[in-house]
Amino acid sequence: MSIGGDGGNAGAGAGAAATGGTGGAGGVGGAIEIVIGTGGRITTAGIEAHAVAALSRGARGGVGGNASGFFGDAAGGGAGGDGGAIDIESLGTLVTSGRDAMGISALSVGGSGGYGGSSGGVIAIGGSGGGGSDGGRIDVVHGGTITTGGDGGHGIFASSIGGDGGLAAGAAGLVAFGARGGGDGTLACLLQPAGCNNGGTVTVINRGAIRTGGDLALGILAQSIGGGGGAGSSQAGWLTIGGFGGEGGDGRAVTITNESTGTIVTTGDQAPAMLAQSVGGGGGFAGNADSIAVGVTAAIGGDGGNGGNGGRVEIVNHAALATKGYDSPIIQAQSIGGGGGNGGDATTEGLALFTVAVGGSGSAGGDGGLVTVRNRGALAGDLDRSSGIVAQSIGRGGGTGGSGYTATVFPVVDIGIAVGGRGDGGGSGGRVEVENWGAISVAGDDSRGIFAQSIGGGGGMGGSAVAYTLSGGPKISFSASVAVGGAGGSGGNGSLVTVGNHGRINAYGDAGHGIQAQSVGGGGGVGGDASASATAITVTGSSIALTVAVGGSGGAGGHGGSVDVTNTAAVTTLGARAHAIFAQSVGGGGGEGGAGRRIGDPAQCARRDAGQVRAQDRCQSLQDRHAHLRQGAGNPDRGRRRRRGRCGREWRHRGSGQQRCADDRSLWFARHSRAECRRWRRIGGPRLFGCDRNSADRRVRRFGRGRR
């Protein structure tokens, strides 16, 4: 274990022009090398008691100093230290039985950046977060025997993780500027933020035997993970700008090679034989901007940080592999981009003649990298959701735009503008290549022989916009509010997927395709909604209220890429909905546009309320008439009347069992004018007795009533 020391915290500054001190850099983790000879035997029985464990961790950067004065400029946090390189070679026997006790654990972690200092003054600038640093390189070679029995007890675990960027600190003042969240701490990455905060390369070679017995106990897990970007700082004042989010780091190359002498068997659930993944870090969220509106005011939210990209992933297998649990793919390789950071919100409230609030933009999601799998060994999966080969490259979603909100009051003239931030595009899925020469047999439901896919990330949603203005004057008043929703981001594209199969595939379960290959574009982001309200009040003069509300446009869907499948061997499936070869390329759907609404328009409300009253009156009238029919009026055209006595003339509707006096009935007939009959027929109601031109008058006269 090698761990660097934390950077020191900086001191605060105060005065007319004050500047805080920069936090100290964290120490670097050192290199580690471990060798286990052929005759070595290591046994552990406790929880989290690994047979071989190597940890190299860089330390966190120090906190930046605060600043307060007429001009306050807070300092940034210190950079984190890099994780060191790790080299392990094991030819001996390693046995563990406790929970989370691994055969070999190799972990290199970059240090996180320090927090920035806060600032206050007439003009205030927040301190930026310190840069996170890279995880170190990891190389593991195993040629002996590894046996683990507990849950979470991986045979080999190798992970290099970049440090997260530090959080930027806020600023408060008449004019306040936010700072960026931390990315990478090295000068090269500060000059080129896209290359920041990275995980290191990871390589694992197995020549021996590995067997795990618990749930969540993988044979080999190798991963490189980029660090997340730090969040930008939020501000408060009269004129404010939110801080930008830091960039996420990239995942680096990950390679697993299982040579012809290596065997891997897992028996627990959720325990793949081999999993290699490279994952980009998420972009940092941007800071918000809150302004107290006085006279003329503006607030602008910061932009989110871009997500990191997934790196290249490769798995090569030459030997037999088997999994015996549920949800346990035999070979799984994936490269996944990091999600884009969300934009910051912008808010202005108070007494102002003119205000602007603009939400920050979301940032792009990271792309998935190239994924390659080459198999020449026999693969066997026994239970459900345990595919033979899973290879996937996935772009992550773009960040959501920040919202814009303004609510102000001012005499005579008041103008407010709110604009939602734009959502950014999703990352694209990378190229996927699978070549198989070995026999694959999977028995469970939802278990594919080969499953290869490239998927684009969805576009980020546009930010919403809301604007309220109110002005008043004795003789003249003008109020205007404008709200524009942010546009949704476009979906990422799927890339080329290539599968070549030259070995026999048997898939026995339902929905267990022999070969499934697909390239899918991401959906477009939804546009932001816009709501606006303008009210102008005068005592005796004229007033003008102008309201504009425009919803944001939806983002375009991503394209599906080409899919190429070549098969030269036998493929057999036995289950329902189980295709031998299933290939598809699917484009993503476009995003829905945002709604634009005017809020509180008196004329519109009056028209709406009057329309609702009229509609309610019509509905009530129709309901009453329907109820009258159901309760005994019936329809004599479809029934049969029967008289009883000279004075007690009664009628009976067929099947109703109800009797009414004919005199009462004639009174009901008399209520219906010709205009009512026409209106009744036009709305599609049941035919009324007395509304038949040829028969109504005769029936009414028969009951002693005159024509209407």
Image (cartoon, rainbow, N blue to C red):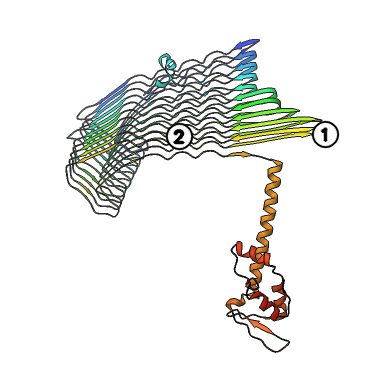
Badge 2 crowding class, 10 Å Cα cut-off, few under 14, some 14 to 19, many 20 or more, is: many
Q: Amino acid at mark 2?
A: Gly
Q: Nearer the viewer, mark 1 or mark 2?
A: 1
Quarter of the image with the C terminus in it: bottom right
Q: Position of residue 509 (x, y in %)?
A: 28, 52
- Label 2 sits on a secondary structure element that is loop
Q: Residue shown at 42%/32% (left/top)?
A: 426
Q: Residue 537 vs residue 684: left or right?
A: right
Please give the residue where the numbered disc 2 appears in the rendered image: 459
Q: Answer yes or no: is residue 22 visible.
A: yes
Numbered circle sitting on residue 622: none
Q: Position of residue 150 (x, y in %)?
A: 33, 42
* Corner quadrant of residue 12: top right
In 3D space, how far apart are the residues under numbered discs 1 and 2 (Cα atoms)? Answer: 51 Å
Q: Position of residue 160 (x, y in %)?
A: 36, 27
* Corner quadrant of residue 49: top left
Please give the residue where the numbered disc 1 appears in the rendered image: 540
